[in-house]
């Protein structure tokens, strides 16, 4: 990006950059534009290991020791020295348990009964599995000799002393909790939680528990947003549903920007309606309005209001979810401190049904990945694809991502899918 790509320039004069077209932004380009304005939260806190799940490390974790700390057996069996493998009989001189080492020394022609995880006795370097020996009182005969040094887990094989185990910017997952515990570390340094405030806009919105009149809808967006944000591990601030009233919208917007790192609204950013949000954002922030070349999902607004990042999502319930996963998720993870957020996994599969699509926009159709009768995973669309049909999102376990250049497809065509399970 060039140096004049400031939010202010773009918000005030969208033509200031070549190849920047707010009326036909490509999805990838919009994501990259947003990315350049994202700096992670700076405040850091020390957390007990349990509490760090889903948080982002603010410092590298280096290994204070070798893991494992000592050479040990990978099997239940007998520890011996490799040079004795050819002997017909070996004398069993004791037993080594996990947590209770054999403290004698193993001489020529001798071995030690050993359990998985027990330290290798002095003088041994190989373990023979118990199933590969025939016992004979205090002696064993090896029926199938292992390779020298087999079945031993060496000190430092998992992690080496001084090694960077997890880097700053890493999002903590279950395996990481165990990994850090295996080092004996009980606390980690993490970025503070990101605060995200959100509200819905629209005169037609009604809260749950109230009756609906004709022309009204229940405010569902706030519930999907709550779910998506909670899954990401941010602190959510739900500011309710606000009518299309400039005074109430202004007060809520300013309140949101004051207390949160990120403000998300749904509805009211399309051109032509009771479009107060656009005026308010021009007055209080530096916000760009894009018609992203995607379906569903336009229009989209991004910018800053005060110090808060602002995302203006479309009102249609499916569009809210699609734009969240395509733009907001990546941005929030970066703001949370994650250095390289893992994109939603995308791969190619065969689609079992025809797909209708016009070229010129990237479509995120809702799909179901399933195991076909021949055992191969394939995808089919959920059915009708209207951007107000939230049931399509509920049925889906993936997006079928159809690039701008793709048109109608016959059954059997190969398509790209983005897996949602475990993420949405
Ligand atoms: P808008 O972007 O405000 O023009 O809204 C587009 C469509 O989404 C309209 O049909 C709205 O009624 C609907 N919509 C907007 N906000 C919500 C919401 N919070 N919950 C459910 N539907 C909504
Ligand atoms: Mg509206």
Image: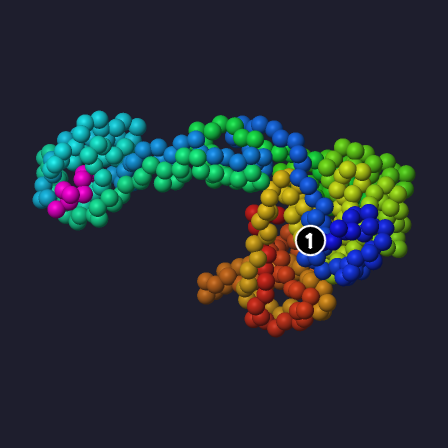
Seen in the image, is 369 located left or right of residue 299? left
Q: Residue at x 73, y 67 (%)?
A: 360
Location of residue 150 with respect to 177 vertically, above or below: below
Q: Quadrant of the N terminus?
A: bottom right
Question: Is 294 covered by the magenta stretch?
Answer: no
| Mark 1 nearby-residue class (10 Å; few <14, some 14–19, many ≥20) | some
**SS state under label 1:** helix
- The percent coordinates of residue 24 (x first, y second) are 77, 61
**Who is closer to the viewer here, 360 or 337?**
337
Q: How many marks?
A: 1
Question: Is 78 covered by the magenta stretch?
Answer: yes
Q: What colour scheme governs how the chains and residues are painted in the rendered image of this protein?
A: rainbow
Q: Residue at x 79, y 48 (%)?
A: 7
Q: Which residues are magenta?
A: 77-86
Find the residue positioned furthest to the bottom. Answer: 410
Find the residue positioned furthest to the front. Answer: 3
The residue where tag 1 is placed is: 32
Q: Does the rendering let one see residue 198?
A: no
Location of residue 94 with respect to 76 vertically, above or below: above
Seen in the image, is 114 located left or right of residue 380? left
Which image quadrant is residue 351 in? bottom right
**Who is closer to the viewer here, 205 or 295?**
295
- The percent coordinates of residue 335 (x first, y second) are 67, 41
């Amino acid at each position: 990006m060039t140096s004049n790509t400031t939010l202010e320039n773009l918000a005030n004069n969208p033509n200031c950059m070549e190849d920047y077209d707010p009326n036909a932004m490509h999805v990838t380009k919009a994501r990259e534009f947003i990315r350049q304005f994202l700096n992670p939260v700076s405040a850091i806190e020390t957390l007990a290991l349990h509490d760090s799940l889903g948080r982002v490390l603010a410092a590298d974790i280096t290994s204070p020791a070798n893991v494992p700390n000592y050479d040990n057996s990978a099997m239940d069996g007998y520890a011996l020295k490799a040079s004795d493998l050819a002997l017909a009989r070996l004398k069993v001189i004791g037993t080594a348990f996990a947590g209770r080492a054999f403290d004698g020394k193993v001489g020529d022609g001798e071995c030690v009964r050993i359990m998985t995880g027990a330290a290798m006795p002095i003088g041994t370097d190989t373990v023979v599995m118990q199933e590969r020996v025939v016992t004979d009182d205090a002696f064993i005969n090896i029926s199938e000799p292992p390779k020298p040094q087999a079945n031993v887990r060496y000190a430092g094989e998992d992690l080496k002393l001084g090694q960077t185990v997890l880097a700053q910017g890493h999002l903590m997952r279950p395996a990481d909790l165990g990994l850090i515990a295996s080092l004996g570390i009980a606390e980690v340094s993490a970025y503070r939680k990101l605060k995200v405030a959100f509200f819905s806009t629209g005169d037609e919105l009604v809260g749950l528990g109230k009756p609906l009149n004709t022309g009204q809808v229940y405010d569902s967006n706030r519930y999907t947003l709550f779910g998506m944000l909670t899954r990401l591990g941010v602190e959510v601030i739900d500011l309710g549903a606000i009518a299309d009233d400039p005074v109430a919208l202004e007060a809520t917007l300013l309140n949101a920007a004051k207390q949160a790192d990120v403000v998300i609204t749904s509805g009211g950013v399309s051109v032509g309606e009771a479009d107060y949000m656009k005026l308010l954002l021009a007055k209080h922030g530096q916000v760009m309005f894009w018609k992203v070349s995607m379906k569903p999902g336009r229009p989209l607004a991004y910018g800053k209001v005060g110090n808060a990042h602002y995302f203006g999502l479309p009102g249609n319930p499916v569009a809210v979810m699609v734009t969240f996963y395509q733009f907001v998720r990546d941005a929030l993870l970066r703001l949370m401190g994650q250095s390289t957020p893992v994109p939603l996994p995308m791969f190619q599969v065969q689609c079992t049904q025809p797909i209708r699509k016009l070229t010129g926009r990237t479509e995120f159709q809702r799909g179901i990945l399933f195991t076909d009768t021949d055992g191969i995973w394939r995808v089919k669309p959920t059915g009708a694809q209207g951007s107000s049909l939230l049931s399509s999102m509920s049925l889906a376990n993936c997006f079928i991502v159809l690039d701008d250049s793709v048109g109608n497809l016959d059954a059997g065509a190969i398509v790209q899918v983005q897996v949602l399970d475990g993420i949405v």
